[in-house]
Amino acid sequence: MFLVILSAVALVLLFSTGLAKKIGRWLGALALALYLLMAFSPLPHVLLLILENRFPPTNLSSLETPPAGIIVLGGVIDTHVSLGRGEVSLNEAVERLTVAADLARRFPEAKLLVSGETRTVDDKNYIENMGLISLGVALDRIIYESDSRNTYQNATVGAAVAKPAPGEIWLLVTSASHMPRSVGVFFKAGFRVKPLPVDYRTAGWDDAWRFFDRPSTGLHLMDTAVKEWLGLVAYWLAGWTSALYRGPDLKNCGE
């Protein structure tokens, strides 16, 4: 959106005269440079790599006790298409759902907390659960809440619904780039979780040197990265997270 606004302002100024026209040329050049940087350079990869590599996956075999629950953050189901077509339509974050279902099979006593989706889905077979059920998860194992609209509410409302007992292990399943913000918010809410990042968009630091051959791919990843970085700053300023850039070390996690 910033790039669109910048380009629009530059275009308007180009039809002016004098200093305004000169400023319009500079802004137009800046908009072009930013477009090339975001659409073709490795910058989106770098910004995502810093986020995605922040938390290594939890070693499930090292857990002292089986997890009491598995938290799946919403955003996996395209509710608009699903409701319109009458069948579950998954988006690119589907790995949250498939990994959660696999964890449910591995830990048959664990509950699944599905947190956050649109209020337009108010049937008891909540559309996110429909996806889990189709993957073999029994309905009576699923706890869901559809009130939360952001990660902060995922943590606060989710804690109130799940009521985790002291000492219980709850696995947090969400996109790797979203994990630093998510863990910070959950710990701030007093909900101790073990991160299990999924839905990686980068393969590793080799991607820091890989340019994009299609601008749509670079711009899409840049949008994802910028959203997360702005989210980190906004949540920290609002006091919703326990750290600006949450890390995996125990001291940093408040334990």
Image: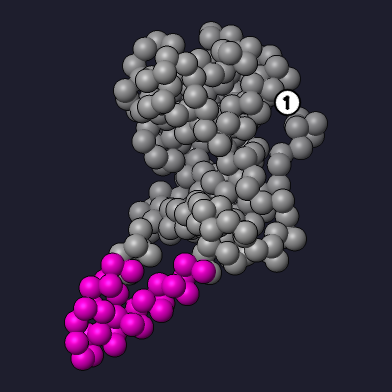
The outermost residue toward the right is 61
Name the residue located 63 percent from the left edge and 48 percent from the top edge.
201
Residue placed most toward the observer, 87 or 202: 87
Determine the main secondary structure of the stretch shown in magenta.
helix
Name the residue located 63 percent from the left edge and 51 percent from the top edge.
52
- The residue range painted magenta reads 7-36
Q: Which residue is mark 1?
A: 65
Q: Is residue 85 left or right of residue 94?
A: left
Please identify the quadrant where the N terminus is shown.
bottom left
- Whether residue 31 is in magenta: the answer is yes
Estimate how packed mark 1 is, as few (under 14), some (14 to 19) or many (20 or more) residues with alpha carbons within 10 Å: few
Residue placed most toward the observer, 245 or 32: 32
Q: Secondary structure at mark 1?
A: loop
Q: What residue type is disc 1 on?
A: Thr
Q: Position of residue 12 (x, y in %)?
A: 23, 73
Name the residue located 58 percent from the left edge and 41 percent from the top edge.
175
The outermost residue toward the bottom is 18
Name the residue located 73 percent from the left edge and 20 percent from the top edge.
106
Q: How many marks?
A: 1
Judge whether 186 appears above or below 233 on screen.
above
Residue 252 location, quadrant: bottom right
